[in-house]
Amino acid sequence: MHSNTPILIAQDLSAVGTLSMKVAIPILSSFGIRISLLPTTLLSTQTEGFQQPVKQDLSPWIEQTFDHWQQEHIHFSGGLIGYLGNTQLVDQLVSFINHDALPSPIFDPVMGDHGKLYPGLTNDYPQAMNSLLSRASITVPNITEAQLLTGITVSDYPTKNEKRKLLTTLTNKMPTGGHAIITGVAVGERLGCIWLENDKLHFYGHPSLSGHFYGSGDVFAALLTGFLLQQESLGTAIQHATDGTFLALQTTNRSPLERRFGVDLSKLLIQISKYAQTGTWDI
């Protein structure tokens, strides 16, 4: 089931590296979903794994673009918001959402990993991100980002009570009916997602692969968006998105390409195309 009105992808665009917008475009397109693009920052490479990238601030262009869209009465059926990079952009997007031009976005608060903020982000950035969280239908922070958004610190291997507290605090910051899904959570030898449904704590994951994969969260967020737009239930969409992300990471793990260049989507896109044709997700 697709809307004639496109969804908006608001993410950074790296000239080098398969992540962020460069994974969202092929993934959502493979579902048959109509998309429009709002590159939030233009980068020579991604911000990790390379020396300091060349950045082009697009804030003036974005402001003019929003004005143009509003003049043309262009609206979107939903959105996927990812890396923004500065508080001015956050404010611009909040204003755009408040004009009812972007209802109930899926929000990936990309800002940190391994317990700290990404390079170049200011200490007030997590607080600014809360203004987007308060307007999101779904949010998919990793465990670091969940702590930054809530101000709650948990142990390296969070207890069930710590997980529940993080999820409950995130959900309380969201509109009624919103759902928080925390990614990158380890349970034993498995890595996956936690979420609350009917007040019950759920976990779904796969065996942890060694090393760091750049862009894995972007793949998950795009897949989750795709499955939810296909009217899958929340639990099913999370499981399918986790399975698809794991397939992409397995493919990347076997690839001769350096990890810093992002995720190998080749096998995943084939499976999404099959799903789009048959409605069956079998991986």
Image: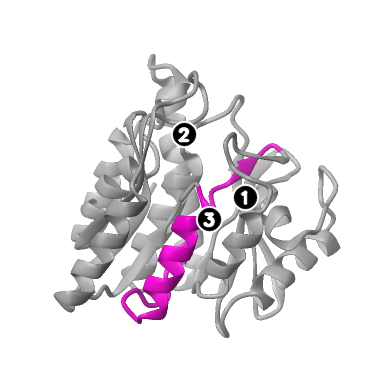
Check disc 1 and give the amino acid type.
Asn
| Mark toward the start of the polypeptide (2 vs 3) | 3
The N terminus lies in which quarter of the figure? bottom left
Which residues lie in the magenta part?
86-114
- Residue with the mark numbered 1: 142
Q: What element carries label 2?
A: helix
Q: Which residue is drawn at 73% across and 72% down?
A: 168
- Residue with the mark numbered 3: 87
Q: Residue at x 44, y 56 (%)?
A: 89
> Does 111 appear above or below 235?
above
- Residue with the mark numbered 2: 249
Q: Nearer the viewer, residue 220 or 64?
A: 64
Q: Residues within 10 Å of mark 2 (few under 14, many from 20)?
A: many
On the picture, is 133 further left or further right than 14?
Answer: right
Check disc 3 and give the amino acid type.
Thr
Q: Residues within 10 Å of mark 3 (few under 14, many from 20)?
A: some
Q: Residues within 10 Å of mark 1 (few under 14, many from 20)?
A: many
On the picture, is 109 further left or further right than 244?
Answer: right
The quarter of the displayed image where residue 173 is located: bottom right
Residue 93 located within the stretch drawn in magenta: yes
Q: Which of 201 and 152 is in front in this view?
A: 152
Cα separation, mark 2 vs mark 3, equals: 31 Å
Q: Is mark 3 on a helix, strand or loop?
A: helix
Q: Which residue ends up furthest to the top in the rendered image?
A: 256
> Does 200 appear above or below 190?
below
- Which of labels 2 and 3 is toward the front? 3
- Which of labels 1 and 3 is toward the front? 3
Cα separation, mark 1 vs mark 3, equals: 20 Å
